[in-house]
Each structure stands twice: as C-alpha cells, then as structure tokens.
Image (cartoon, rainbow, N blue to C red):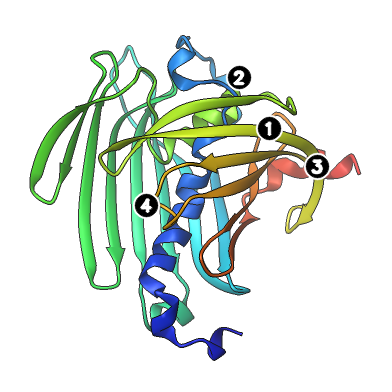
Amino acid sequence: MLTSVPVRSLRIPSVAHICRCAVLVAVVALSPYSVGSIEAEPLGEAKRPFQVGERLTYEVSWLNLTAFIAVMEVARMDGPKDQSVAKLVGTAQSTPVITKFFPVDNRVESELDLDTLTPEHMTFRRREGKKKEDIEYVFHQKEGVVTAVRGGTTESLPIPAGTQDIISCLYYTRTRLPPNPGASLKMNVYHDKKNRPVEVRVEAIETIEGAWGKAETVRVLVIMPFHGLFMNKGNIRVWVTNDERKTPVRMTAKVVLGSIVADLVDGFEEIGAAEQKY
C-alpha cells in the first residue's frame, strides 16, 4: 500500500516526471519504420487517422493510484498559404492527492507540418513541484539542425532527417503504423538536448477492454536503451486500435517502484466500430 511506504523513500519528484513522460514519450517509437529512412510525401486529410479538433484524455495511475490526468489534442493553427500546419497540445496535471505534496502542471505545444508530419517548433512549459522551466526547440528539418533554448542558453545541434519531438511522434506514428506483428525498427526522437535512438517491435494483435469497451489493438513493445527518462533502462508497451483511427488506448511501463498505466478515458467515440466487432 502507498501509505505504508515513506514518501521520501518513493522519490516522488522522479515518479512524477516518469508519469508525465509516460503519456507524452512512451509513444515515441511506435512507428514501424526508421524515421530517417522514410521519404516525406504530402498527405491528404483523408490519409491521416487524426483530425483537427481531436481530444484524447488519459488517466495515468501509479501503485493503483490515479496520479495524473493527461490530455492530447489537435488544434487549428493558421500557417503559410503553401503549408498546412496544426498545433499539437499535450498537458499533464496532477490529481488532488498528488498535488498536496508534489503539484505538476505541464504543457507541451508542437507545431506540426501536416504534409510531412514533422515538427517545426516545440515549447515545453514544465511546472513540477518547486521547479519551473520553459524549453523551446526550433526544428530546421531541411538543414538537419535543431535550435534549443533552455535556461537562458541557446545552442544548435545536428539531427537526422525526419526527427520527431516527444508529442509529434505520436501523430506521425498513427499515420504510418501498419499492423504487422514481427516488424521492428529504430527511430530518432529529439528530447532534452539529445538525439534519442529507440527500438520498436510490433508484438501482436490483441483484444483488450477498458472505458472504451472492447477493441482489437496492435500491441507494440518500445525498448528504451538509454537512461534519464525512466531513471533506468526499461521497456514500454502501447496498445493502439487496429482500425482507421489508430487511437492509443493504453500504455504500461515498469519503473523502479511498481508500474505506470495510462488508460484512455475520454475521446474514444471513434472506437465504436471496433467495439461492435465483438
């Protein structure tokens, strides 16, 4: 039980950071292709599984306690006449029981080129406990460079072609992911001033149940070979509906103490067709 473990021994700030990353980062490597090996091609609206106005809400639990509410949405954004751009918004807020001792109120915004599904500009407003930090990345995809502004310091670093950020990768993945068990890949996600290589393996087609009812999903294993995001190396599993919407409905990740589970609790109206199959 949570009450039987001293709060200090749980290293709550680190766990809060993990829960935030669970929703925004776990989907980083779902795509069955290497980002750097895909030639960008224009995508029509009909080919995208997500639409402007979509809003997905998740409950993120840890040790059977709902710790955070995370929301991912696609907002309209005016861009140049020759370019279609949307604003991806991801938020994570601690629930009242967690807020009492470690409040979290984070917000990520990413400007996504809807033709190439690559990010152009990302901002991260981090509010965790007493820590307040604003991070900004500007992606120069054609030049293979990202400009990072953090803590009053600006620097430019090289990135592979097609590099994603921690939220754009979800929408890229939902568009490109085929339901082929056994597929594997490596892709690059730029996060925290580093290029992050991640390996992905499509494990199986699996039917699961939740607030959305019963749905056929694609189960994907994400192998995180680096330290930092989850305190140590570890695997993440994500379930995405096996339909035209490709909606992420569940994510699980083991951490130092227990596991994180993120379940979709609102925004699953489009999963109705999958529910009716069973």
Q: Amino acid at mark 3?
A: Glu
Residue at image position (67%, 48%) is 268
The mark lying in front, picked from 4 and 3, is: 4
CA distance for labels 2 and 3? 26 Å
Residue corresponding to mark 1: 202
For the C terminus, give its image quadrant.
top right
**Compared to 261, does 161 lie above or below?**
above
* Residue in view at x 38 percent, y 66 percent: 14
Q: Which of the marked residues, 4 or 2, is nearer the chain's N terminus?
A: 2
Tag nearer the camera, 1 or 3: 1
Crowd tier of the residue under label 4, counting other residues whose Cα lies within 10 Å: few below 14, some 14–19, many 20 or above? few
Kind of residue at disc 2? Ala
Circles 4 and 3: CB distance less than 8 Å? no
Q: Position of residue 119 (x, y in %)?
A: 35, 28
Q: Nearer the viewer, residue 29 or 119?
A: 29
Residue 214 in sight here: no
